[in-house]
Image (cartoon, grey):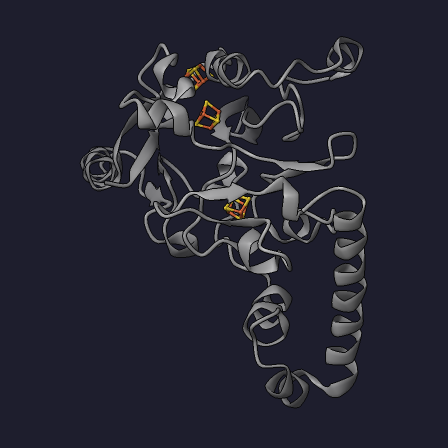
Amino acid sequence: MSKAVLVDPSKCINCKACQVACKHWNETGYEDLEKVEAYADLNIPPAITPKTWMRVAVKEIDDGDRPVYRFTKTQCMHCEDAACVKACPTGATHKDDEGYTVFDAKKCIGCNYCVSACPFQACKYDEEKKEIFRCIFCPDRRAAGIATACSTHCPTGCLTYGDRDDMIKAAEAKLAEYKKDYPNACIYGKEEVGGMHYIYVLQDKPSTYGLPDKPTVPAGVAVWNALVKPGGGIAAAAVVIGVGTAAAINARHRRMEKLQKEKSAAGGE
Ligand code: SF4
Ligand code: SF4
Ligand code: SF4
């Protein structure tokens, strides 16, 4: 059965044990210490990087006479309707049989379309390794029947791992409780972008946690996927979005195909 992590930011203390556990288990390496020391706030690092596949984002909100900080674990959400998958012209970024978003380095041509398309800024291209990095939802641990590294090491109960259906039920139970005191409380990730493998139960609107209120597949990506991407109907695309635009996109596609052939000739697949 499909797994998910339930995230309850009201229980997060920004200890970053999850962030360190992810690095440790996946051997991603550590950020440049000089850069880390230069960060002016608690956002360390301030964005997902090839070495930091998940991070605890810190958002300061104005609560009248004093600032309030919200801590939110962020990473690839493994969206069902994944913009990155739709944007990828080669199938390098794709879905596995269980619905997690995965990556095949041999097929990547470094176009960075997936990076631009993601509504959560959750994947990054490593210029040195020539690969895309994102949360991989700990497939080795899942296969062994154990929870993800991040959720295993959370000391406060902010992160719970389990069957997705059970995590949704747990989120709904918490929501009923939170609604009594927080009218804007909501569940995030049950329906958004087709459903996610991270389900959040929030006491306020998603944007107050630094999450997009209504994450979507960018319109251009949807058109590209439906009409222009290999396998789509290029004739229909010309009618709908105009011959000029379609021609421009396909010129880019031909350039990418050429790049892919060059990469294959140089030793890739
Ligand atoms: S969060 Fe971004 S990188 Fe992850 S599946 Fe969704 S679109 Fe792709
Ligand atoms: S599921 Fe695994 S790869 Fe993803 S953030 Fe958690 S520890 Fe990192
Ligand atoms: S381990 Fe838990 S409490 Fe600590 S930063 Fe991560 S989610 Fe928050």
Instruction: Give the position of the N terminus as an image quadrant.
Output: top left
For the image, the number of numbered tags is 0
Left or right: 140 with respect to 214? left
- The picture places residue 139, in percent across and down from the top left corner, at 40, 30
Front in this rendered view, residue 123 or 200: 123
| Residue drawn where x is 73% and y is 17% of the image | 40
- The picture places residue 138, in percent across and down from the top left corner, at 42, 27
| Residue drawn where x is 37% and y is 20% of the image | 151
Left or right: 84 with respect to 145? right
Up/down of 118 relative to 199, above or below: below
Front in this rendered view, residue 68 or 106: 106
Q: Residue furthest bottom?
A: 239
Front in this rendered view, residue 142 or 269: 269
Up/down of 147 relative to 82, above or below: above
- The picture places residue 25, in percent across and down from the top left corner, at 49, 15
| Residue drawn where x is 44% and y is 48% of the image | 79
